[in-house]
Image: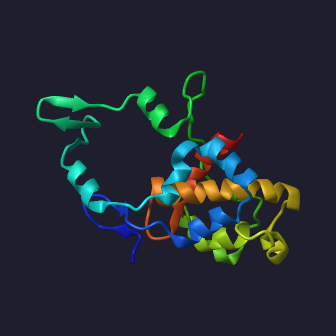
Amino acid sequence: MDPLIRSKVPMVVKIPRKLIKWWKMFSSLEQYELMQKLGTLTSLLDITPRPDLVEAMLTYWDPQNLVFRFGECEMTPTLAEMSGLTRLSYISKDMILPRDHSRTRFLSDLGLKDNKHLKCLEQSWISLDYLFARFGPQDSFDVFWDEFCTTKAKWQRRRLEAFSLALLGLLVFPLDERHISTRLQSVVMALFH
């Protein structure tokens, strides 16, 4: 089944099994660290998407003003409400500002060397399969050692960042089936550094 369905907006209708498998490969300590960084976004792995409800809610969305409109009543989520929903504090936090996006910076952030398998970076995306193979299983560093320009200790920390990129790119800001926007790396870097 296609994890995205075409309607007024693309939406996730099925959580990729590989993403769930990747989550289960982490130790409980690593899962805890991811939950500290991502808040309740990790709970998206446990839900069953309901495209019918999203479609119904879209009829009330006013894209010009970015609010839900029910007749004369407007419902605008506040930062406090969003903070409560995600369980991430927004008080005394710096805003995430996008940095210049480049193939070189993306690869450097993940400790990867450029190679022929990464033509997709020209369109600013990377596949779940590629990220999972290199950052999912514990032995990935040993299997793909010649594709990394980092130490195993640094790779171990970057596994969490790669997973966060995949989760955000597939469930929060989806592009297309199993395609993850590399532009989200600046968000991941802001969360982890």
Give coordinates of residue 97: x percent, y percent: 56, 36
Q: Camera-side residue: 94 or 11?
A: 11
Which of 41 and 5 lies nearest the eye of the viewer? 41
Q: Quadrant of residue 81?
A: top left
Vertical position of residue 109 compared to residue 6: above or below:
above
Q: Residue furthest left?
A: 71
The residue at the far top in this view is 92
**Residue at x 25% of width, y 60% of height:** 52
Indicate the quadrant containing the C terminus: top left, top right, bottom left or bottom right: top right
* Horizontal relation, residue 129 to residue 138: left or right: left
Quadrant in the picture for the N terminus = bottom left
Q: Position of residue 44 (x, y in %)?
A: 49, 54
| x and y percentages locating residue 144 in the rendered image | 79, 75
Name the residue: 72% across, 66% down. 135
Q: Which residue occupies the foreground of this view, 175 or 82?
A: 82
The answer to whether residue 24 is visible is: yes
93 on left or right of 51: right
The residue located at (75%, 55%) in the rendering is: 158
Q: Is residue 84 above or below residue 24?
A: above
Q: How many marks?
A: 0
Visible residue check, residue 127: no
Residue 154 percent across, percent down from the top left? 83, 55
Q: How is this picture coloured?
A: rainbow
- Seen from the viewer's position, the closer of residues 151 and 28 is 28
